[in-house]
Image: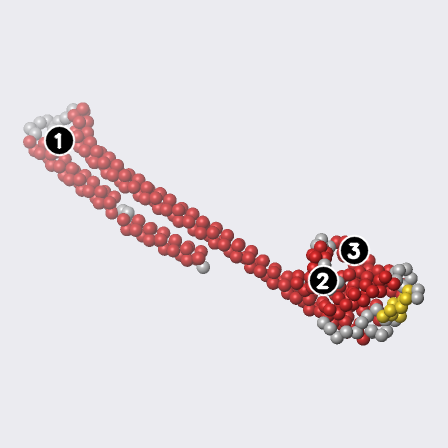
Amino acid sequence: MIRIELEVGLGETMEELRDETQVKDTPRAAGWKLAAVFVLTGLWAVVVAYLVWETIRVSPQGDCGSWLPCLELNEWGDLLAGIFAPVAFLWLVATVLIQSDELREQRKELALTRQEMKYSRDVMKEQAEEARAQAIYLGRQTDLLNEEAVQRRSESAFAQFQSLIDIYITSSCMYYGDIFIAENTFTSRLFRRDAIDALRYVSRHYDDIQEIVPNIEMKKVELVNPNFFIILFKYLYAADELLPRIPYAQRLAWKVSMLPEIVDWYCNLVSACEQLAELQGYVDARRRRKSSDGFDDAPLLRLMTE
């Protein structure tokens, strides 16, 4: 819109300049000068004719059969020079005046051309500034769109994460009395049944695991109803995969609840229990994923849990 208005204004300004130039610099000056030269030339011709006539009229009668007195050749040259010299001078003056008018017109055309170039430079400058402003605006809009896209993906990932955690907790409470871990003479339930929020449930489950860890060597572990554990493992594993993509505050809260450490212990349990061999691919994939992560929240988590 700014560029269109500027170009329209420039067009109107240049048209006005051209109109003024046409009004001021019409060929009237050269016209009246030429007319004046023609009039003077005609008057001079009348004067010459009159002088010649008077010369013939007052000249004595002689043997010459001419209307003019008998003249020598050099006298004819003087006569013609006297007649045409004023005419030549008059037309020379007219030529100089007409050329001066043309030069003045050319100077005005050059001035108009320079002014047009100046206006063109101004237009190009305005267009460049507008293009720069548009580029900045588009860059900001792109950044906003990217941020919105990232936020939408993050919110979508968090919704999926919450669904997986809810299913995991509901299923673990349902299998509370069915899944046991055993090694040598030690046997213990692996899950609890508490009506608490998800973060506290996961945190307490981590505490339960810490009570189990000193009693098993992770060499030859067996599970009662391992198929139920496999189901729960897949839910929690999928939630752990989504953890890096959820919003930062929620991600930090779930890391403080020790969810990644629970998945680590599950992976160690898979490696130590032959009944869970089908989950070994998940364990290997998680190790590769962790080795490729560039950001580590562990120092911050240690400060928050101390």
The crowding category of the residue bearing disc 2, from other C-alpha atoms within 10 Å (few below 14, some 14 to 19, many at least 20), is many
Q: Secondary structure at mark 3?
A: helix
> Disc 1 designates what residue?
68
Cβ atoms at labels 3 and 2 below 8 Å apart: no
Q: Is 159 situated above or below 115?
A: below
**In the visual, does 112 lie left or right of 203?**
left
Q: Quadrant of residue 290?
A: bottom right
The answer for how far apart the CA atoms under marks 3 and 2 are is: 22 Å
The crowding category of the residue bearing disc 1, from other C-alpha atoms within 10 Å (few below 14, some 14 to 19, many at least 20), is some
Scheme by which the image is coloured: secondary structure
Q: Earlier in the sequence, mark 1 or mark 2?
A: 1
Amino acid type assigned to the residue bearing label 1 in the image: Leu
**In front of the other: 251 or 147:** 251
**In the visual, does 65 lie left or right of 217?**
left
> Disc 2 designates what residue?
256
**Could you tell me which residue is drawn at 82 percent across and 60 percent down?**
283
In front: mark 1 or mark 2? 2
**In front of the other: 23 or 271:** 271
Locate residue 47, reporting x and y percent: 13, 37
> Disc 3 designates what residue?
288
**In the visual, does 84 lie left or right of 178?**
left
Q: Quadrant of residue 50?
A: top left
Amino acid type assigned to the residue bearing label 3 in the image: Arg
**Could you tell me which residue is drawn at 18 percent across and 39 percent down?**
41
**In front of the other: 102 or 298:** 298
The answer for how far apart the CA atoms under marks 3 and 1 are is: 128 Å
Amino acid type assigned to the residue bearing label 2 in the image: Val
**In the visual, does 57 lie left or right of 191?**
left
**Could you tell me which residue is drawn at 40 percent across and 56 percent down?**
8
Q: Number of marks in the image?
A: 3
Q: Earlier in the sequence, mark 3 or mark 2?
A: 2
Locate residue 173, reporting x and y percent: 79, 74
